[in-house]
Image (spheres, rainbow, N blue to C red):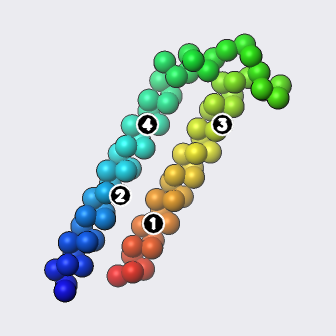
C-alpha cells in the first residue's frame, strides 16, 4: 500500500511540475513580439487601449494560475 501511495505522489507531482513549465513557457510567449504586436492597436475597449487590457488580463490570469497551483500543492501535502 505504501508503494502505491509513493507512486501516486510521484506522478501527481510530476504532472504539477510539467504544468508549471507549460504555463511558464506560455507566459514567456505571451509577452513576446508577435502577441504584443497583435494587441498593440489604436482601437480601444471601454476607453482603454487593447494592449493594456491584454496585459492586465494576462497578469490576472497568471496570478490565478499560481494561486491554483499553490492550493493544489497544499492539498497534496494535507492528504499525506
Q: Are marks 4 and 2 in contact (CB under 8 Å)?
A: no
Residue under numbered circle 1: 72
Q: Provide the residue designation for mark 3.
A: 56
CA–CA distance between discs 4 and 1?
20 Å
Residue furthest top as drawn: 42
Which residue position holds label 2?
16
Residue 24 circle label:
none
Kindly state the secondary structure of the residue where label 1 is placed: helix
Q: Sequence-wise, which precedes: disc 1 or disc 3?
A: 3
Q: Earlier in the sequence, mark 4 or mark 1?
A: 4
Where residue 28 appears, as percent x and y from the top left, is 44, 33
Q: Are marks 2 and 3 in contact (CB under 8 Å)?
A: no
Real-space CA distance between mark 4 and mark 2, rounded to the nearest whole angstrom: 15 Å
Q: Position of residue 4 (x, y in %)?
A: 20, 78
Mark 2 vs 3, N-terminal side: 2
Q: CA distance from mark 2 to mark 3?
A: 25 Å
Residue at image position (57%, 18%) is 38
Say whether residue 58 is left or right of residue 29: right
The residue sitting at 41% across, 41% down in the picture is 24
Secondary structure at badge 2 equals helix
Residue projecting furthest to the bottom:
1
Q: Are marks 2 and 1 in contact (CB under 8 Å)?
A: yes
The circle drawn on residue 26 is: 4
Amino acid at each position: 500500500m505504501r508503494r502505491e501511495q509513493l507512486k501516486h505522489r510521484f506522478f501527481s507531482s510530476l504532472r504539477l511540475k510539467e504544468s508549471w513549465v507549460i504555463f511558464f513557457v506560455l507566459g514567456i510567449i505571451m509577452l513576446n513580439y508577435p502577441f504584443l504586436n497583435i494587441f498593440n492597436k489604436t482601437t480601444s475597449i471601454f476607453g482603454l487601449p487593447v494592449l493594456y487590457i491584454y496585459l492586465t488580463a494576462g497578469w490576472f490570469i497568471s496570478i490565478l494560475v499560481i494561486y491554483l497551483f499553490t492550493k493544489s500543492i497544499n492539498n497534496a501535502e494535507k492528504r499525506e
